[in-house]
Amino acid sequence: MTNNSVKKELLLCTIAAALVLLNIGAHLLCTKMFIDLPLTEITLALIPMTMLALCFIGFKMAAKEE
């Protein structure tokens, strides 16, 4: 395994961790405590798009590796 391959795998793991944190954050923002904040709706609308973009980047990186 080359050093470059290890770096790409670490980056993919970081992307996966970011997706998990975005998912948990979205569920926390949906609680009744935060639902009255003005930017909550916009933030919740942007989370799925951000997750899709991160998945797309991860798939492109994984496809390049093969």
Image (cartoon, rainbow, N blue to C red):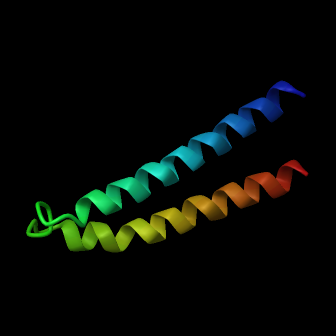
- Height in image: 10 above or below 20? above
Image quarter (top left, top right, bottom left or bottom right) of the N terminus: top right
- Height in image: 5 above or below 52? above
Q: Position of residue 65 (x, y in %)?
A: 86, 48
Query: Which residue, as the protein is rendered here, is positioned at the far top?
Result: 3
- Height in image: 36 above or below 8? below
What residue do we see at 20% from left, 67% from top? 40
Q: Position of residue 24 (x, y in %)?
A: 38, 54
Q: Nearer the viewer, residue 33 or 63?
A: 33
Q: Nearer the viewer, residue 28 or 39?
A: 28
Q: Quadrant of residue 46?
A: bottom left
Q: Position of residue 32 (x, y in %)?
A: 13, 66
What residue do we see at 24% from left, 67% from top? 30
Judge from the rendering whether residue 55 lies leftward or rightward of residue 47; answer left or right: right
What residue do we see at 65% from left, 64% from top? 56
Q: Position of residue 55 (x, y in %)?
A: 62, 61
Judge from the rendering whether residue 18 lies leftward or rightward of residue 56; answer left or right: left
Q: Nearer the viewer, residue 60 or 17?
A: 17
- Height in image: 1 above or below 43? above
Judge from the rendering whether residue 63 lies leftward or rightward of residue 49; answer left or right: right
Judge from the rendering whether residue 64 lies leftward or rightward of residue 31; answer left or right: right
What residue do we see at 26% from left, 72% from top? 42
